[in-house]
Amino acid sequence: MSLAVIILAAGKGVRMNSEFPKVLHPILKKPMLRYVLDAAQEMKPDKIVLVLGHDSELVKESVLDYPMEIVIQEPQLGTGHAVSCCEEALRDFSGDILILSGDVPATSVLTLREFTDSHAKNVADVSFISTLVENPDGYGRVLRNAEGEVLRIVEHKDATAEERREKEINAGIYCVNSSFLWEGLGGLDSENRQGEYYLPGIINFCVSRKCGVQAFTLADSKEVSGVNSREQLGEAEKTIRREINRRHMENGVTIEDPETTYISGSVSIGKDTTVCPNTYIYGETRIGDGCRLGPSVYIEDSRIGDNVEIRFSSYLTGCEVEDGVVMGPFCHLRPEAKIKDGAKIGNFVEIKKSEIGVGSKVPHLSYVGDADIGAGVNIGAGTITCNYDGVNKHRTIVEDGAFIGSDTMLVAPVKVGKEATTAAGSTITRDVSSGALAIERAAQKEIKGWAERKRPKKEKS
């Protein structure tokens, strides 16, 4: 059976108390709407239609990379009206239409596949996902007869006190045959407290016409929890984060404290890697086998090789780290930093737009920016590449085997040759020849009797 997907994302999200569109609020640094779009894409539908309303231009700009058609709901007259706005876009489609909400980000593709398969197997006209919750406030209730058949769905605001005691809720995910959908939407009315056309009314219309209705009851209610408040946003993030962490652990990654570990879904981690508490890994990060990360490490959009150790409170963005590197604690790798095999980056070191060669060491208290450091180089404590003249950035080159003494200032553009040495405390402004010692410092001067001269004198009375 052919499949199309409609995603409803036109709501304002008043309870978020935000100037920002609700569906763009991030979960693990990714807008929640993109979770729904990713799941929809994985269903491999013939077509995806996204319904936008409030702040439509801002939302549209954030999802233009998805292959889909966008329709605008104006004015916003309820979820039923939102789906009806898609009729023109799906006029030539024949098959099942899966309807998702842009503010329900935690539903797995596995659940959606089981749901649509069940819909097809039971030859239902309309199927919807229901679930049981302890606190159903705000959700539409599923009402059944004594035989367990669905009678209707009643929205919370329209429910009686007795109906509100029901714990089975409508999760807001539907699968409807296209041959019935548009007719069913025509049977909706706005006779309710909100004065809107509710999509759940299609269930009631279907029951009244004695058509096939299926409630697909999901055991894990967290998968279909909607986000209407900041608190619910936090709960959705927990649900998604736990599932991501579970998958990594299942694949051979040790996560010492899953409750304090934040990994986005786009990250890959090799087997036998250990992730310590309070670690954050985001974006298109790729981590190899046998690494140890943390505690309290932040990594984003970076490539980490095998058997790398990143120690306490290190911060890496947009960088590449090859095999066997040890770094930290308290180091900062900025975009375009490349650390080659076996190098060591120590505490309080910042590296930006630089390559550190095989086996080289930058052990502590250094800034290396816009530099090419060769293999087997030692960068002494307090070394700084002075790369910025106030207008332009300039590069520093340190060739293989060089020894940079502590507190050396390398004023770019400058080159230190192979196996050359700079003496501690030197300011290097000219190129240093291979094998040479460069020393630049003022002559030491000693003033005898200084302490006596500076000692306070007692004034005579």
Image (spheres, rainbow, N blue to C red):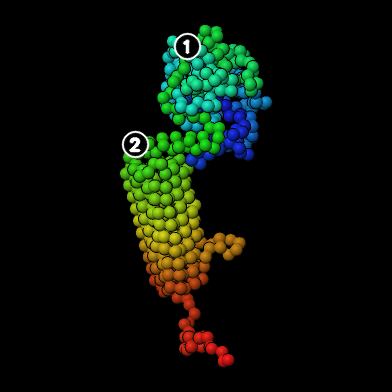
Please determine whether, in this image, residue 442 is positioned above or below residue 82: below
Q: Residue at x 48, y 86 (%)?
A: 451
**Structural crowding at the residue carrying mark 1, measured as other residues with C-alpha within 10 Å and reported as few (<14), some (14–19) or many (≥20):** few
Please determine whether, in this image, residue 22 is positioned above or below residue 334: above
Instruction: In the rendered structure, find residue 176 and report the number of the disc placed on it.
Output: none
User: Decide: marks 2, 1 in contact (CB < 8 A)?
Assistant: no
Residue type pointed to by label 1: Asn
Q: Is residue 189 left or right of residue 127?
A: right
User: Mark 1 sits on what residue?
Assistant: 145
Q: Earlier in the sequence, mark 2 or mark 1?
A: 1
Q: Where's residue 171, x and y in %?
A: 50, 24
Instruction: Name which quarter of the figure residue 52 lies in.
Output: top right
Please determine whether, in this image, residue 324 is positioned above or below residue 25: below
Asked whether residue 442 appears in the rendered view, the answer is yes
Q: Where's residue 321, x and y in %?
A: 41, 51
Disc 2 to disc 1, C-alpha distance: 42 Å
Residue type pointed to by label 2: Glu
Secondary structure state at the residue bearing disc 1: loop
Q: Is residue 256 left or right of residue 35?
A: left
User: Mark 2 sits on what residue?
Assistant: 250
Q: Residue at x 57, y 16 (%)?
A: 201
Secondary structure state at the residue bearing disc 2: helix
Q: Where's residue 34, x and y in %?
A: 52, 34
